[in-house]
Image (cartoon, grey):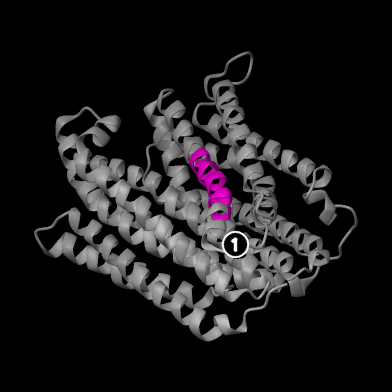
Amino acid sequence: MDQTYNKKEKLRQLLFILIPILITQLAMYSMTFIDTLMTGRYSSDDLAGVAIGSSLWVPVFTGLSGILLAVTPIVSHLVGSKKQGNVAFSVIQGVYLSVIMALIVLAAGAFSLTPILNGMNLESRVHETAFDYLAALSTGLIPLFVYNVLRSFIDALGKTRVSMIITLISLPINVVFNYLFIYGKFGFPELGGAGAGFASAITYWLITIISLYIIHKHTPFSSYGVFRKFHAVSLAKWKEILLIGIPIGLSIFFETSIFSAVTLLMSNFETEVIAAHQIALNFASLLYMIPLSISMALTIVVGFEVGAARYEDAKEYSWIGVVIAVLMALVCAAILLLFPEEVASIYTKDANVLKLTTHFLIYALFFQLSDAIQAPVQGALRGYKDVNVTFIMSLISYWVIGLPFGYYLANYTSWGAYGYWIGLITGLAAGAITLTSRLIYIQKRKFPAGLQKNF
């Protein structure tokens, strides 16, 4: 990454970092979609089992991997402050910590998975598939957590195209192994839904190996000497990563898990309503990849500028990112407003589900506007390493304001299922307002432009 001197240069550098991140996020989203599609074509029971397994795993993984995202602002600050010699030590400590976290998850899963599934009153085939899928997936947990650290290091240097290429390589790998293990082709065992778990695990191992090779052999990564010597475990560095990472991980967990909670609460409604809700939520999640990617890019560039004590530049980056997100949200909102039936028809041909989905998509329109503010602002705050207050704000916005309000509307007013969506919109809006206020406070009080330095 380079120092920039005007808004035009900042916009160019931000887009250079952002576009590969967006492609990467869309590719990762596509991997989940492909798993679901290929398992669904094998059998509905296997699809249900994989869906249950994913619903248990995704909130846990997103929350825990969020902890490892702390490596991004840490490395960005070190590079921005010309302390490249400390980068390798920080990355290696992140790798050590990721392995420990993976082992803890494996141990917790071994003791708790069966009781959790037993408590869900599932059909025997669905229960078996969910267990086998998660057991298969667990064989790739260690490389998956390590890869999150390696990707954070790569992205922190502004080389997001490398992460994009690695993820794009992983897509066909995942498809091939899905085909081999789900359907039992070319002499491979026919494992159904469990095969999707093994396919993902193998993919995790391969992309981690590819990342290790690139970091060790190719510039600029090799110049940091990450794997050239042994570094002893540093509990002090682990503490730094956890102090930054735990609030990030919890913020992500509370944001993602509230959607799972709403889905579970909606199980009391008719099947068509649940299906329409899932379709609209799936499409809204796809559109969320845009502000999420902008958020991740802002963490990198803001962290770089704050590390160099160029606080005015960090401030400009923050608001350029928010403006881009809002403009993109307006485009997405226009699509949802003008073509709701066309979007819904991608997922279903059922007339009743189609009609209900178009109604839910109108509510999803308001998701875009709130997400366009709160997601980039959160990313900027992470760049400032301001994570504790933002975690509390996220918790209150989603779980104290959004979910209870949605529950009240859905169960005690005529809004019905739409009440949950109004609650979600209210929570997201509250998050956008409070987080924006926090960013303004941080920029004015803790990192005022008057302290700016130029190197």
Q: Nearer the viewer, residue 191 or 76?
A: 76
- List x then y, in percent, for residue 297: 55, 56
The image quadrant where one finds the C terminus is: bottom right
Q: Residues within 10 Å of mark 1 (few under 14, many from 20)?
A: many
Q: Quadrant of the N terminus?
A: bottom right
- In the image, residue 59 lies in the stretch drawn in magenta: no
The total of numbered circles placed on residues is: 1
Single out the residue that lies furthest toward the left: 414
Q: Is residue 147 visible?
A: yes
Q: Quadrant of residue 136?
A: top right
**What's under tag 1, amino acid-wise?**
Val
Q: Identify the residue shown where x is 29% and y is 30%.
A: 346
Does the image show residue 250?
Answer: no
Task: Please give the range of residues in magenta.
Answer: 13-28
Q: Main secondary structure of the magenta part?
A: helix
Residue 20 painted magenta: yes
Q: Position of residue 206 (x, y in %)?
A: 70, 36
Q: Which residue is mark 1?
A: 301
On the rendered structure, is 277 left or right of 244?
left
